[in-house]
Structure formats: structure tokens, C-alpha cells
Image (cartoon, rainbow, N blue to C red):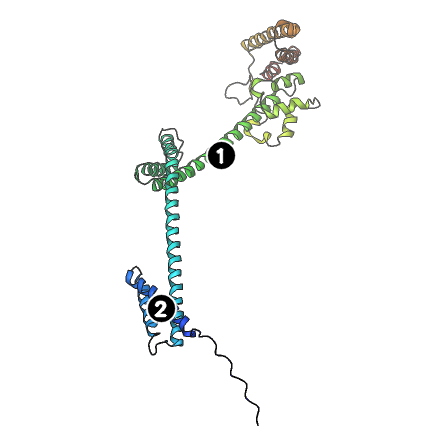
Amino acid sequence: AAPASPPAAAAAPDAASPNEALMAKVHEVQQMVNRLIHLGSLSGDLMEEAKQVKLVVDRAFDGSVGGNAVRLHLAIRTYEDFRDHLEQRAAALRGASAAAAVRQMRADEVENKAHALLPRLEANARRIIEHLTDGHSGAAEASEAEEQRQVVGQLQSALAANPGNPAARVLALHGALEAAQGLLAKRSQRLAAEEERMRTEITAQRADELFRLLKQRRNLPMATQVAVLRRKEFANDANAQALLRAGRTDKPLYEQLQAMLPTVAAHPASADTSAARKDHLAAAGSEGRVHIVSSRMKNAVQTMAANLRRARQELAAIAAEGSAGGRAAAEVAQARDIVAGLDHVLSEVGGTSDLQRQLDAMDEME
């Protein structure tokens, strides 16, 4: 006989159907969706989506008591998509709220800064208006004067505009002050150029004058030539001070100056004085061809010579006293230099009876 079959296995305890867990979850979803729709707090597109989810969830229970597994899964997935959309919308709303808060904070910050800046900007604008309208602003040309009027008008408009809007007021004043700064910068550049031109002209004129004086004294002792360099008008002259520092005696000072400044001799003021030397004895209208020697001229020469001798004695006394006489060392040195020059001139005058040569010698002692 065939072997007996093994006894059947004991029946397993009752277990919940797999669809039951899905159905319980779908019931929870159904309740939540119903509450959302009932509250009516969703926006239009989200409310429509919630109603579509409700239809899918309700259909999951159609057809059988236990529901259809495919429909149950579809209901869960549809709800999860809807939940994701809700979270995205919530995040977007939180971001918009935060951005609005930041914008408000920035607006408050801008207004506070504007309030702090306004007093200084207004004071600057009023000060510039006063400077440009006081009649001493230095507008040299018609175009600059017109630009000045426009800048003043812009500043005045900025001070009067936007009384209740500090930020807009600050922006208007800032623009007007920038325009004023541009005008003043151009004016400053023009004045600086004019100052430099005047300084150059003064330096050239002083160099010409120094050259002329030194050339007149080219035949006088070096001490007399050096005395010119020590004059007050050349105390701050770079050329005169350079000649003093060099201390050279091998050639006349005017030649040394000409070597330092090659262009000085080309200036009309530096022309050779010997060619323009005055002919004291020429008859009027003769252009130097006729000379007249009168007793009055001879007496005048003798008087000038006597005056030079008296001046020489006084200066010699000052030089002899030195600092003991209470005079500064520079004055004593200058007196000695002039005495040396007078000695040379008086020697020239006394060494000739030629009236023209005597007058020329005195001319060199200018």
C-alpha cells in the first residue's frame, strides 16, 4: 500500500489583507482632503487640485468592499503630489514674505541714512551757492559764467525739491553738488594754469633784469657785480643765489648767468646795453654825428663825481666800523662791495678828460 500522506500543516492565524493597510491610509487622506476643501483657505489652483484628489480618493473605494489595490495606490500617489505642491507653495510664500521684510528693512535703512546725510549736504549746497554768487567767484569767460548760473540753479532747485522725501532729496542734492564740483575743478585748473604762467613770466623778467644789471657792470670789480646779487629784490631769486653759491671770479657774472640760462640774452630786455648806451653829448637831431661840449655839462660831471666821492666816504666809514657800528654783517659787506665799485668808477672818471668816457663810467654805476 502507498505510504500515508503527511498531515496537513496547521492553519496560520488570521492576518489583515494587504489592501486593508492601504485602505486605512486612503481613509486618512480622504479626511484630510475633505477638511482642506471645507476650510476653503486654498488659493484657486490649489483648491481645484484638492477637488481632483478627492475624486481620485473617492473612486478608490468603488467596485468592491475591499477596494481596488491599483486605485488605492493611485489615490496615495495623487495625494503625495498634491502635498508636494502645497509645500512648494508654502516655501514660496515664506520666501516672498522674507523678501518683503528685507525690502522694508532696506527702505528703512535708506531713509535713516538720508536723514543723517541731509544736514551736511544742505549746508554744502548753501555754502557753494554763496561762494558762486558773491561776485568774487572768478568766472573768466562767458561759457563758464553760463555754466555757473546753471549750477547755482540746480543747487537751488535741489534745496527746494522733495521736502517730504529724504531719499529723493539726497539724490537731487548729490547730483547738484557733483555738477558744482565739476565746475570748481575746471576753475581751479584754469587758475592754476594762469598762476603758473604768471610765475614763469615773473621769473623771466627777473632773469632779464639781473642780466641787464650784471652786463652793465661787466667791467667793474667782481665785488660790485656780486653786490647786485645781494640786493633785496634778488634775495629769493634762484639764479642770483646760484651765482652766489658758485662764487666764480674767472669771468663776468652776466656771462655766467647767460651760460646758466641760454635764452636770457635773446629776450628784448636783455639786449646789449652798449649799443643802446645814451650819447650824452649828441646834438638833438644829429643822430650822434654832432657833439656839443658845454661848460654846464662839464660842471654837471664834476658835481656828480663829487657826489660819488662823498657817498664813497660815507660807505667806507660804514665798512670800517663793521659790526661795531651796530650794523648787520650783510650791510657791512654790501657797503664794501659798493665802495670797490665806486673806486673803479672814480678811477675811470679821474683818469680821463674825455667827457663822454666820464659819463659812460658813471652810467655803469647805476
Residue 90 found in image quarter: bottom left
| Viewer-closest of 24 and 132 | 24
Farthest right residue in view: 250
In percent of width and height, residue 48 lies at 31, 66
What residue is shown with label 1?
A: 193
Tell me, yes or no, if residue 143 can be seen here. no
| Viewer-closest of 204 and 66 | 66
In percent of width and height, residue 120 lies at 39, 33
Position of 29 relative to 70 (above/below):
above
What residue is shown with label 2?
A: 27
- In primary-sequence order, the first of circles 2 and 1 is 2
| Viewer-closest of 357 and 263 | 263
Tell me, yes or no, if residue 308 can be seen here. yes
Q: Residue 138 vs residue 311: left or right?
A: left
Disc 1 is placed on an element classified as helix
Position of 280 relative to 207 (above/below):
above
The amino acid marked with disc number 1 is Ala
The amino acid marked with disc number 2 is His
Residue at point 53%, 30% (across, down)? 200
| Viewer-closest of 173 and 141 | 173
In percent of width and height, residue 49 lies at 33, 67
Verify CB contact (< 8 Å) between mark 2 and mark 1. Answer: no
